[in-house]
Image: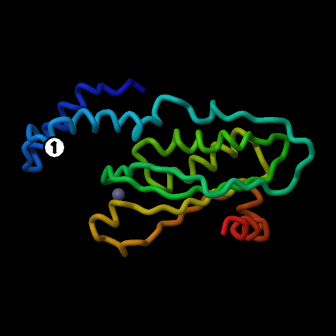
Amino acid sequence: MKNMNSEQIEKLIKELIGQIGEDPSREGLKDTPARVAKSFTKLYGGYGTNPKEIITVFDNEGYDEMVIARDIEFYSMCEHHMLPFYGKVHIGYIPDQKIVGLSKMPRMIELYSRRLQNQERLTKQIADTLNEVLKPKGVGVVIQAAHMCMQARGVEKQHSNMVTSSFTGLFKKNMNTRSEFLNLIK
Ligand code: ZN
């Protein structure tokens, strides 16, 4: 993935401001293209690093119950409208041979969310990554998010949240495991 060309982005944003009927040279807008270009390095900073490579795993010393990381905040940009969607990720897994450093979860989520995304794919990518790296007995991922594209355009009720989930292994096959997880993240 090539690095963003800030100069080129500034040029395009300036043009875009003109196209929506504004004057890009007026006081309040003249530095906006530069600010937007700078914000893009954060908003779209998830490209270029493989999230699977930043996860550190450790040997499991016999722990065989569910591990939960809940309420991990994320911000992403919806690929259909380029507007933010944001909320919380809840992750659960039952280890087999490996466990994961929990501090790596937010960083992994950051790398997937700071891209043009949709919530379904984001949910599945997080679950698939943990499944691949940890080879656990099962993974569950639930994401609750508010979408500015729904709220700002008045498509849905103003405060409606979208909930998505992805389950593997025992979380998929075993109803008790799944409901234990869903209870623990409430
Ligand atoms: Zn959207």
**Crowding near pointer 1: few (<14 within 10 Å), some, many (20+)?**
few
Could you tell me which residue is drawn at 68 percent across and 57 percent down? 140
In the foreground, 122 or 39 = 39
List the single residue furthest toward the right. 62
Q: Check the image and tell me how it is coloured.
A: rainbow
Q: Quadrant of residue 176?
A: bottom right
Residue 152 horizontal side relative to residue 102, left or right? left
Q: Quadrant of the C terminus?
A: bottom right
Furthest residue in direction bottom, as rendered? 157
Q: Which residue is mark 1?
A: 28
At label 1, which amino acid type do we have? Gly
In this rendered view, identify the residue nearer to me: 145 or 26.
Answer: 26
Q: Position of residue 34 (x, y in %)?
A: 25, 32
Give the residue at the far front of this rendering. 27
Residue 15 in the figure: left or right of residue 60: left
**Residue 168 visible in the picture:** no
Examine the rendered structure and indicate whether residue 106 appears above or below residue 168.
Answer: above
Ligand 1, seen in the image, is in the quarter at bottom left
For the N terminus, give its image quadrant: top left
Image location of residue 138, percent across then percent down: 75, 54
| Vertical relation: 42 (above or below) 72 | above
Identify the residue at image location x=58%, y=56%: 89
Q: Secondary structure at mark 1?
A: helix
